[in-house]
Image: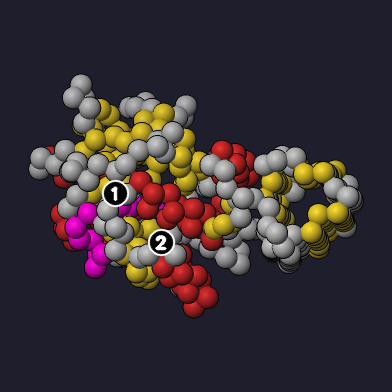
Amino acid sequence: MRIIIPMAGMGKRMRPHSLFIPKPLIPVAGKPIVQHLVKDIVKICKEDVEEIAFVIGHFGEAVEKQLIGIAESVGAKGSIFYQEEALGTAHAILCAKEALKGHVVVAFADTLFKADFTLDTNQDGIIWVQKVEDPRPFGVVKINDEGYITDFVEKPETFVSDLAIIGIYYFKDGENLRDELQYLIDNNILDKGEFQITNALENMKEKGVKIKPGEVTEWLDCGNYQVTINTNQRYLTYLEERGEKLQSDKAKVKNSVIIPPVLIDDDAEIENSVVGPYVSIGKGTKIKNSRLSNTIIQKDSSIVDGHIADSMIGNNVEFKGDSRSLSLGDFTRLE
């Protein structure tokens, strides 16, 4: 089994939080989004994951080393591939064509999921979907009476289906997927100006490949900072239900009330404060005389005299102030 994770996008909808680090490395519930994604995919696979291929921009040596470490943490080889231009989902996957062989999972790194199943590798293909109220921003599928996918439509302007593709796919034959993606590029087959995986899937279906929809318990989006705050809330609840430890023994909590679930990382300090529920506090961050709820705070930040809710705060931020909802990028100072 191989996993391919396209993550070369600039993360414009996540700014200012993605100005200094790629969006998939922004932490949710104490770990980078992509690390949660890798761990959850490995969990549903019934065979060993041999390789995890990350398709990135030129993010620098430190980011590449971190990604390799994430792959190695689950016993897989980490590989780095580059996407020089944002030319669509099909193009992004094909950038890792050397890894497109055998059983392959493709997972775009702006989504997390909750699931309670084991991947059925005997299927030709599986695409995970979720019902949505407004399908227009998504690729969607239609399903026949036998339970197989009959149509793929990218961002429909009129209603076709409310089953949105969440960005996680399984293919029994990675080489076949590679050839279909290459066909789109070689023949300049564009959809809304980009090379889309849905066109390759349509070609595969027409040639007899049977693709089933997969169901997840919950789809957790990380597309922008508002939905990422909500995903942090849901993921903290998920970790608490699994009985995972959320508070580091190296954290210091003095004269404070913690309302779970709250994640507190190493060397964080909380004094004279009420924290929770649904708060993630990064390594080395200090909270004093404050009230926090439903908030992500990253590493080495300082919050004093704050009443903060529904917020996302970056690394090395200094905030001293009143009640508000915040979106503060790295190295910001606000008093």
Dot 1 or dot 2, earlier in sequence:
1
Whether the residues at callouts 1 and 2 have beta carbons within 8 Å, the answer is no
Residue at left 43%, top 59%? 7
Residue type, label 1? Lys
Which percent across, then down, holds residue 41? 38, 50
- Front residue of 242/273: it is 242
Residue at the disc numbered 1: 46
Q: Is residue 126 visible?
A: yes
For label 1, the SS is loop
Residue type, label 2? Val
Position of 146 relative to 122 (above/below): above
Horizontal side, residue 247 vs residue 201: left or right: right
- Front residue of 113/140: it is 113
Highlighted range, magenta: 97-109
| Rendered-image quadrant of the N terminus | bottom left
Residue at the disc numbered 2: 74
Dot 1, crowdedness within 10 Å: few (<14), some or many (≥20)?
few
100 in magenta: yes
Residue at left 57%, top 57%? 31
Which percent across, then down, holds residue 309? 76, 42
Q: In the picture, residue 227 is in which quadrant?
A: top right
Residue at left 31%, top 59%? 49
- Front residue of 38/186: it is 38
273 in magenta: no
Which percent across, then down, holds residue 111? 46, 47
